[in-house]
Each structure stands twice: as structure tokens, then as C-alpha cells.
Amino acid sequence: MQNVTPSLMDILVFRLSLLKPLIFLELFFETDATSQKILTMLSDLTRSLNELCEEVRAIRNTGSNESVDAGVLPLDLPLHNIEELNNAEAALQSQEANKAMVRRFALIGGTTLEVRVCRVMAYAITNELASVLNWAGKKTKDQTKQKRAFKDTALCRCIFDGLTQQLGANSMSEFVFAQAVQKWLRYAPDRLGGAGRTSSVPIPE
């Protein structure tokens, strides 16, 4: 067989082909900061979408698997606005009404603690009302609106008591409950189709 000696041009072309991946990597790392921001945003968006899908599935199933009746309830749920919330707060000052709502909330189940919280919150208040609430009553990010503190309401205590009655007194701390409620309240504007999100998100079956 005849020996073929590679030319200088062949060697140069070969070495350049080896450099292509390195050039690509160099260009990639030059834009690494931007890429990381994009990936972080996509990750946050995907997580939020998954949470919304899980909440919608839970809401769709609310009542479908619950045949137990808690009797006549003192509140007409869900609450739609601050006026209805104020009326509910007044009604819940009654010990009998308070106990009735705790029993009702205790009937609402879910596959995880977070799903239970989402289902109870969706049963109790609408996204419209949730949009003007937050856990601690802090101002909005633009500091233009003061939101009402949900943690200080009798309704919040009823929900917590109902969940702990269902799961057991030591099954859920107030901190864990607060984290779950904060997340649900935070995404209420998104569920209404807030800025930056579509108003209709396709939900996989």
C-alpha cells in the first residue's frame, strides 16, 4: 500500500476542526451570565406553571371525592371581596360558627400538605380576594398598595385548625402552613392572568 504523507494544508484543516468545539465553548462562556439568567427565568416559569397545574387539578377535584357533609355552614364560600371577608370575620366570632368551619375545612383532603392548603384556600376565597391579601399585610413591590394581613384573620385560624384536625396536632407547624399560604396568595394575580402571564394557561389532563 502506498504511504500517503499529509500535506501542511491537510494538517492545518484537521487541527482547525479540533478547535471548533473550543471556539464554541469560549463563545458560550462569554454569554454565560445572560444564558444563566434566561435558564433561571425558564426554570421559575416552569415551576410556577407546574404549581398552577397542580392547584387547578386539586380545585377540579374539590368535592368530587368528599361525600361527608359538614352540615349547614355559617359562611357562603368562597369569599369574593374585602366586604365579604369582613362579614365572615364577624360571623366567625361565634364559637359555634368557628367550630362548624373548622369541621368543614378538615374534610378537604389532598395528596400532599401543600395541595391540601391550596384546596382549602381555593374553597375559602377567590383569586380576586387573594390578590388584595398577603400573609403579613406588607405593601406591594411598588409600595403603592397596602395589602391586608391574612395571618391575622379568624378565617386563617379556622383553616389552620381544620388542617391540623385532619392531619394531627403535630403533623404541621405554623411555619410550614404559613409558607404554603404565602405561596398560594403570591400567585393569585397570575391565576387571574396578571402582567407577564397569559390569562389562559393550558392545563394538562
Image: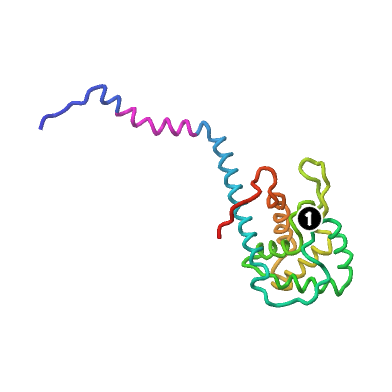
Res. 182 image quadrant: bottom right
- Which residue is drawn at the image coordinates 72% and 65% (left, top)? 120
Q: Amino acid at mark 1?
A: Leu
Q: Nearer the viewer, residue 192 or 51?
A: 192
Which corner quadrant holds the N terminus?
top left
Residue 51: percent from left, percent from top: 62, 55
Residues in magenta, as a range: 14-28
Residue 43: percent from left, percent from top: 58, 47
Q: Is residue 28 left or right of residue 117?
A: left
Residue found at the far front of this picture: 200
Q: Is residue 194 above or below residue 10?
A: below
Res. 87 image quadrant: bottom right
Which corner quadrant holds the C terminus?
bottom right
Q: Secondary structure at mark 1?
A: helix
Q: Nearer the viewer, residue 22 or 95?
A: 95
Query: Crowding near pointer 1: few (<14 within 10 Å), some, many (20+)?
Result: some
**Residue under circle 1?**
129
